[in-house]
Amino acid sequence: MALNPKHLVPLPIRNRLRGFRWPAGLVGLLPGRSDWFGPPRRWMRIREYLSSSPGQVTEALPLQELVPPHPTQLGAFPSRFLGSLRTSVPPACVFSLPGARVLGAEGWVVAPGDVFLTDASFEGNVEGKPLRDHHIFRVRRGRAPAQRPLPGRCLSLASDYAIGGFGHFVHDSLTRLCLVEGCGLRAPEFDWVYLPRPDTPIVREIVSRLGVAPERLLNFDARFDLRCEELTATSFPGAPGTIAPAYARFLRSRFSPPALRSNRRIYLSRNGFRRNFSNLAEVEAILSGHGFEEVRAHDDPLTLQKCAEAEYVFCIEGASFFNAVFCRPGTGVLLVYPDRLPHAVPYALTLAEAAGFRTFVMKGETVGDAGVDGGIADLHLDPVALEHALKRMISF
């Protein structure tokens, strides 16, 4: 058996190298181009590039003013989630250009001249994050994979993290279709549609509503970068962690099925996944006593229908909650926040506000010592507090 050269490097050193990034200031001095190895040698914003290069750009949605979320807090709540809210999200555009490459599951757009278009990506829109920290500069993008040519017109709806996270798929990727259709374009009109995505029943149902033939709907394939004869893509829709009402209305109107009833009480569970309730049986017994049915969105093909028919929703903050965007305005939602969740990105709160929900929040206590990762640890939910919270939401 041939020896893999990387095995000559001790594992701890390999792990450190994986986290190393090319210094942005030195990237332009690297030999060759990114279709040979390494990251793109130049970078610009979309409008800057297209001001002097072939292609066109159209504003699809102007700046969107935001109403800050004002959830009803039931007991103590990690207030830092209300401390990083935006008052608006920037304008968003659709652009087309010839000869572009699309890299990886993230769908990074590299224009002719080896120019990375930063504002089409998630990482390029994170406030306060310097360009040098963008993941495109990771050393692990070494030798470039082969290129798959895509003749004709290609639409990319790809976004960072969408292939592995349902929340990013809904919030950051599907919302790009709002911009595309707002410009009078339709996915079935393209020869190719690039949409990296998780493989779950609800995602398959959503994708089926695009009307794109399966052989023309591309998922991520690690063997290839894509080279497009003509690429149409979008700037990042809104802002990372913040969704505007226009996007939420689009998702609901475009993908929610007609409701056959309007009084479901659903529990979007994390059954089988980490960061669940340590006293799960106790929590589920209380929910059942109040008429909540468990919905395992990762394997329930009726999730869209159940969300469209929901009157009340209960969920731990996380990816499962993004299914709720397909619920009607006015739905009552109760979100449980782990008290040691290691971020303060207000994804769930801005989604609930944009969707027009009546939002209630409470905390669960992370189980474990001071060093435990609150993003993966289980949490304990006080049953008395849960009873009170459910009664408060239902009687509101």
Image: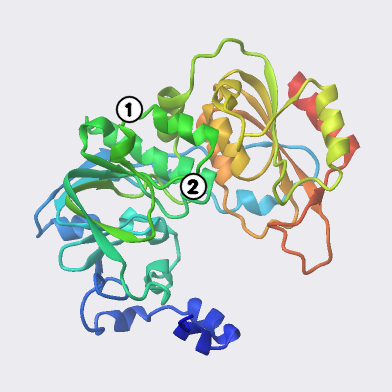
Residue 327 drawn at (x, y percent): 56, 25
Residue beneath disc 2: 168
The amino acid type of the residue labelled 2 equals: His
- Report the label total: 2
* Residue located at (43% from left, 74% from top): 140
Left or right of 45, for residue 337:
right
Residue 29 appears in view: yes
Left or right of 236, for residue 245:
right
Q: Is residue 286 above or below residue 7?
A: above
Residue 69 drawn at (x, y percent): 58, 39
Residue beneath disc 1: 211
Determine the secondary structure under disc 1.
loop
Q: Is residue 86 above or below residue 127?
A: above
Q: Give whichever of discs 2 and 1 has the lower sequence position.
A: 2
Front-most of residues 341 and 154? 154
Q: Which of the 4 image quadrants contains residue 300?
A: top right
Q: Is residue 391 above or below residue 180?
A: above
Question: How many other residues sit within 10 Å of disc 2, few (<14), some (14-19) or many (≥20)?
Answer: many
* Residue located at (44% from left, 26% from top): 255
